[in-house]
Image: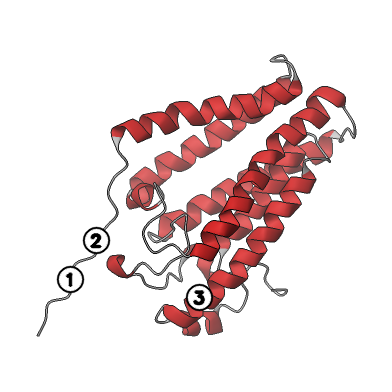
Amino acid sequence: MDTPEPPREPPAMSRNKAIAYAVGLPIALLLLIFLPAGTLAWWPGWIFIAVLVLAFGASALLLAYVNPIIFRARSRFQEGTKAWDRALLAAIFPAIAAILPAAALDAGRFHWLPLPLSLIVLGYAAMLWGIAVTAWAQAVNPFFEPGVRIQSERHHRVIDGGPYRFVRHPGYVAAIALFFGMALALGSVIALLPAALASALLVLRTAWEDRLLRAELPGYEDFAGRVRWRLLPGVW
C-alpha cells in the first residue's frame, strides 16, 4: 500500500519581506489617512489607527498561539491561484484602499457629510466584530489563504467548525463588516461608496469560489447541504 505523501506547507516569509511589511504597512496607513486629511492633527484618524493596530495585534497574537501556520498560508499568493480570482482582487484591493483617503477627504478635510457619534460608534463595533470573526475563522481554518485555489499539496479538506457552522464563507462576512465599519468609524458617508464597491466584488467572489469548491473539493457539496447559507443566514 502506498504511503500518502505528507502535506507540503507553504514556506515561511523571508526576513526581508517581513521587515518590509512591518515598516511599509504602517507608513501606507499613515499616508492614506493624513495626506488626504491635510493635517497630522486630525485626532479621529489617530484614534482609528490606534484601534486598528491594537485589534489586529491582538488577533495576530491569538493566531500565533492557536494556528501559527496561517501566517505562512497568507504570506503570498500560492501557485494554482485562479486567474479570475487574481483579476477580481486587482479590483477589490484598490476599492478597499480607497476607503481610507475617501474618509479622510470627507471627514478630515472638507466635512461634506458629518456623521453623528452614534454611527461612528456603530462603525467601530462593526470593524471590531469583523476583525474578531476573521480571527475566529483563521483560528479554525489552516487553509485560509489570500487566493482561491484547491490546496491539494496541503491535503485541502472541508472545515466545518467555528463560524463555518453558520455560513460557508465567514471570512467574507467579516470583511464586509470591516469595510463598512472603517468608513463609519472615520465618520464618512462618502467612504461608504468604495466600501460598497469592495463588498459587491466580494459577493461576486463568494459565488465563484463556492462554485469552484462544489466542483473540486471533496466533501464540500455535503457541507453545502448542511450549511445552506453562503454569507447571510436566511437570505443567501
* Residue for point 49% across, 50% down: 135
In this view of the protein, can residue 166 be seen by the observer? no
Question: Is disc 2 surrounded by few (<14), some (14 to 19) or many (20+) residues within 10 Å?
Answer: few
Residue 144 visible, this angle: yes
Distance, label 1 to label 3, CA atoms, is 24 Å
Residue furthest toward the left?
A: 1
Q: Amino acid at mark 3?
A: Leu
In the displayed structure, 155 sits above or below 197; it is below
Residue under the image location 55 percent in, 73 percent down: 210
Q: Nearer the viewer, residue 171 or 118?
A: 171
Query: Contact (CB < 8 A) between labels 2 and 1?
Result: yes
Residue at 63% in and 52% down: 91
In percent of width and height, residue 212 lies at 50, 75
Q: Position of residue 234 (x, y in %)?
A: 71, 75
Using the image, tell me which numbered label, if any, was put on residue 173: none
Residue 187 point in image, percent of width and height: 79, 34
Taking the image as shown, residue 128 lies to the left or right of residue 113, namely left
Q: Nearer the viewer, residue 164 or 96?
A: 96
Look at mark 1 in the image and give the residue it sits on. 5
Q: Callout 1, which amino acid?
A: Glu
Residue type at mark 2? Arg
- Give above or below for 109 relative to 84: above
Q: Residues within 10 Å of mark 1 (few under 14, many from 20)?
A: few
Q: Secondary structure at mark 3?
A: helix
Q: Label 2 belongs to which residue?
A: 8
Mark 2–mark 3 Cα distance, whole angstroms, equals: 22 Å
Q: Position of residue 206 (x, y in %)?
A: 60, 67
Residue that label 3 marks: 212
Rendered-image quadrant of the N terminus: bottom left
Q: Identify the secondary structure beneath mark 2.
A: loop
